[in-house]
Image: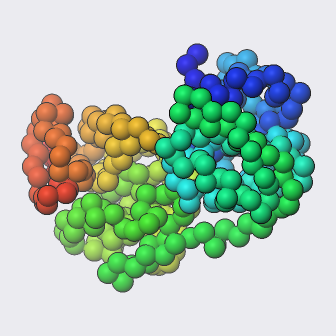
Amino acid sequence: MLFSQNSQIILRHQNIFKNKKIFFSGNIQDELPKYLSSIKTGLHLSINDNVYINKTQNINKPNIYYNLLVSEKVVKNYNTLIYYWPKSKSEAKFQLYNLLSCFSIGTEIFIVGNNSSGVKSSIKILEKWTKLKKLDSAKHSILFSGILKYKTKFILKNFFKTHIWKDLYIKCLPGVFGYKKIDLGSQMLACTFSKNIHGEILDIGCGSGFLSAYLLKKSPNSFVTMIDNKESAILSSQETLVSNQLKAQVLSSNLYSNISNKFDLIISNPPFHDDLKVNFNIINNIIIDAVKYLKYRGELRFVVNSCFNYDFILKKNFKKFSIINKTSLYKVYQALLN
């Protein structure tokens, strides 16, 4: 079993966890919660992760809580928190404030993260509630520990950021793509939408819901399905729809994992990063599998950085394709099935 650098540093101290009731949360990227010995193990997932949801064969079966937020009821039987720091500081604050508002005073807290993720800022961010000390550092990762001294308050609505673009109100939670600002690539893709678009549309990786909201404004008779694998994105998209009095179906899905029907148009501004690592598998899978989920004469339309070339993979899977908009930073591909 291969473990991430963050998990390896936890394993260096595995003996201290044997007699604890551990609750895992944050940016967990491997199966350590299944293998770390403890009295009781809980696992909080806010991302649709098939590694944990679909597999039942494991050594230490954790209790899985799949939701955006945790509650006092969920964590009341745990006395230890192991939190994996994400690449977004604002997302870490959002998640930790929720977690620490639910755990009892006296809970042991362990925070682990890569040096490049900004995990060192956890000391200052949490100084009102716990005094974190460095327990260990190795392989570009750091492990901090502390005891919860005071409880914090968590108010969900305070974490939403609102962007305004062409009379649209875009709601976004920390950690969701587009939180700091509406991405220029997304704006460029949106500007290719017209009232001529109609039928059933699938928005892959909907994030804040910006693309779907603008498409529905341009073409209100369209039937839009929005999917994302992050619960924070699902809620952000739902809030964006409500704020603009729009209607669409919003689903939790890891790419096409929860999709069974076919569409006239698939749109996406796909990520090419998986946490801190570059990952082109996401866009490749969107392109390759789109053929299965498009109707006759269906279309795939997506935006990517101008430096990336997808001509080869598009030529293998679509009858014809073209670049319908381009700048020095981004380009929009249009691929036609028939």
In-front residue for pair 9/266: 9
In-front residue for pair 253/107: 107
In the picture, residue 20 is in which quadrant? top right
**Which residue is depicted at the point 53% across and 33% down?**
140
Report the side of 180 relative to 312 (left or right): right
Question: Split into 4 quadrants, where in the image is the C terminus?
Answer: top left
Report the side of 201 relative to 253 (left or right): left
**Which residue is depicted at the point 13% across and 33% down?**
312
Q: How many marks?
A: 0
- Residue 213: where, in percent of width, then height? 38, 70
Evaluate whether residue 306 shows in this view. yes
In-front residue for pair 136/1: 136
* Colour setting: rainbow
Report the side of 252 relative to 261 (left or right): right
Report the side of 138 relative to 81 (left or right): left
Question: Split into 4 quadrants, where in the image is the N terminus?
Answer: top right
For this orientation, the residue located farthest to the bottom is: 167
